[in-house]
Amino acid sequence: MQRIKTIVLEDLNISILTGVTLLILLLCAFAFGNSMYSLKNIQSMAFQIPEFGFLALAMMMSNLIGGIDLSIIATANTVAVFTALLLNGSWPLGLDGWPLVIAAAIIGMLISLLFGLFNGLLIARTSAPPIIATLGTMTLFQGIGMALTGGSSVGNIIAEFAELGKLKLLEIPFIFWLFLLAAGILWFVLTYTAFGRSLYLYGGNSVAARFSAISNERLCISVFLITGLLAGLSGLIILSRVNSAKVGYGDSYLLQTMIVCVIGGIHPNGGIGKVQGVVIAVLLMRVMSSAFTIMSLSPYTKKLIWGFMLLLVLGLNYMVSVFYEARKRKRERKGEGV
């Protein structure tokens, strides 16, 4: 019992989130039964999670340094547009089949890194607030995609690339395993490497980080490179799943990624939060979205529920912070008594 209590109190935010998620899973099982947890529906959710999950991880990285990246959706869509133009022969590479798929995917990733580098340099070199800088680059990236497509969708990509979005491993989509792998790598990097410790210090106190011999500019650029790469991966997954690319796809994801990060325990001012919290929040949001679809709820009702969920988690987080402060003062008083 004491061990369970220690595990729960070790990270109360994640413990609360895990408890809420398990409760909702049980309620969905009781209310919907096989409609929710049939193999077909589980596979459907697993197909849809990665494109949103990569965007949530990208938003998490920018939040951890006290910033926000408003350009992640524009990056994903524009990378998808570039890749689609390569895959449908509009920009011929002289390749065909799987060599073309590999070459186009690599070029798409390089473009996403270029967009991330541009964001990082803009913020690091000009000291512009990330929310303002990425608002500008969001418009810029959207403009590039619009200029390339004229606002229309780009389709007719080769069949081999579309097959990537349909691959399954142990009856679960391969792209879902890819999302879990990326989340695991980020968890390891943030938890056990010097880069992760520097990132949390920078997010918590950038002045202290600078006096700790940390290059804030280099760290900022590195974070936005990762953010751009994650957003680009989401764009490629979207392209492989829907077989086309278009500027403006998934605009509603931007607000949802912010909600997921807050629910997952990521502090918007930086320095606090864990990858596992975001992963659990992504799974929770997908399960609830599936439940909303089964219940045929209107978009307005969905927004009402998302808003209630956000306020509920914020309230629970406030109670957690009060609890921790009370424990801290109690320990200090005991120390003074000794």
Image (tube, grey):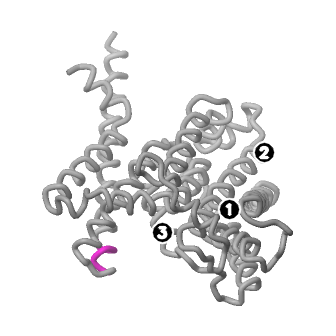
The residue shown at (86%, 69%) is 94
Q: Which quadrant does the C terminus fall into?
A: top left
From the viewer's perspective, is residue 147 above or below residue 106?
below
Q: Residue furthest top?
A: 338
- Residue pointed to by mark 2: 218
- How many angstroms separate mark 1 from mark 3 (CA)? 19 Å
**Which contiguous range is marked in magenta?**
300-304
The residue shown at (72%, 31%) is 212
Q: Which quadrant does the N terminus fall into?
A: top left
224 left or right, relative to 169: right
Quadrant for residue 256, please give it.
bottom left
Dot label at residue 118: none
Residue 3, image x, y percentages: 27, 20
Main SS class of the magenta portion in the image: helix
Taking depth in this image into account, of 102 and 221 the one nearest to the observer is 102
- Residue pointed to by mark 3: 255
The residue shown at (25%, 78%) is 296
Q: Say if the magenta span includes residue 270.
A: no
The residue under label 2 is which amino acid type?
Arg
- How many angstroms separate mark 2 from mark 1 (CA)? 16 Å
Taking depth in this image into account, of 105 and 133 the one nearest to the observer is 105
The residue under label 3 is which amino acid type?
Leu
The residue shown at (66%, 70%) is 80
- Residue pointed to by mark 1: 129
Label 2 close to label 1 by CB (< 8 Å)? no
